[in-house]
Amino acid sequence: MATDHQNPASKQQQPATSAFKLVIYEQENFQGRCHELTGPCNNLQEAGVEKVGSILVLCGPWVGYEQDSCKGEQYVFEKGEYPRWDSWTNSRRSDTLVAFRPIKVDSQEHKIVLYENPSFAGKKIEIIDDDVPSFHAHGYQEKVSSVRVQSGTWVGYQYPGYRGCQYLFEKGEYKDSTEFGAQIPQIQSVRRIRDMQWHQRGAFHPVN
């Protein structure tokens, strides 16, 4: 799945031949050996990638994982540049990325319902076609133990302001927090994952 390229920067000027394209550099600031992905990779080391120092997303979005087989902490990457690990996460000191897969974004509409208790019980907060940087500001101060995504693709964050651990929500049901990869049932902000097909003005840009 991973192929070496000596000068991938030149590929930025060429039309994309794949719906998904991501370039991994083994050093920060897009230096060192680089590897191109156009599809899922369950183990970067087996594909010849020794370390992830920086990432260039030419066509996205993607989700990266800290463990192989797409397990562990999640990191969402939309089209753009990520020169070092703290440009894609502020939740931990770890810079470990071991697996990647593309995220399918197939809807222009977005609706998500987050529930206090498992199995869609208790108090809830419903969000339609909006990004919410603080649940508390919307009057919701409960934990989040289950989630229903009726349309769109979302990323939830452990803390307000899109900070802390990230949780990817694709269309479907998550009956308890373990199903979306959370060790504790806490989500305090959520936003829509953007795709250039639907959002021509671009994607979300992380602010350090």
Image: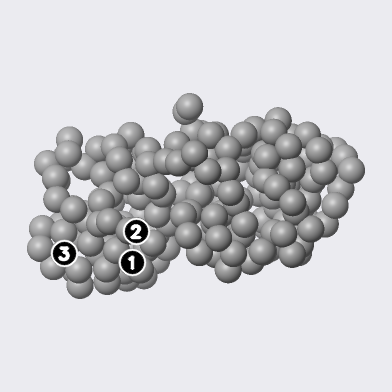
**Amino acid at the residue labelled 3:** Asn
Alpha carbons under labels 2 and 1: distance apart: 5 Å
**81 or 67: nearer the viewer:** 67
Mark 1 sits on what residue? Answer: 178
Mark 2 burial class by Cα count in 10 Å: few <14, some 14-19, many 20+: many
Residue 39 image point, x, y percent:
68, 63
In the image: residue 57, left or right of residue 12: left
Residue 69 visible in the snapshot:
yes
What residue is shown at x 69% (from left), y 59% (from top)? 44
What residue is shown at x 57% (from left), y 43% (from top)? 95
Residue 42 image point, x, y percent:
64, 66
Q: Is residue 139 above or below residue 181?
A: above
Toward the front, the furthest residue is: 93
Disc 2 secondary structure class: loop
Marks 2 & 1, CB-CB < 8 Å contact: yes
Mark 1 burial class by Cα count in 10 Å: few <14, some 14-19, many 20+: few
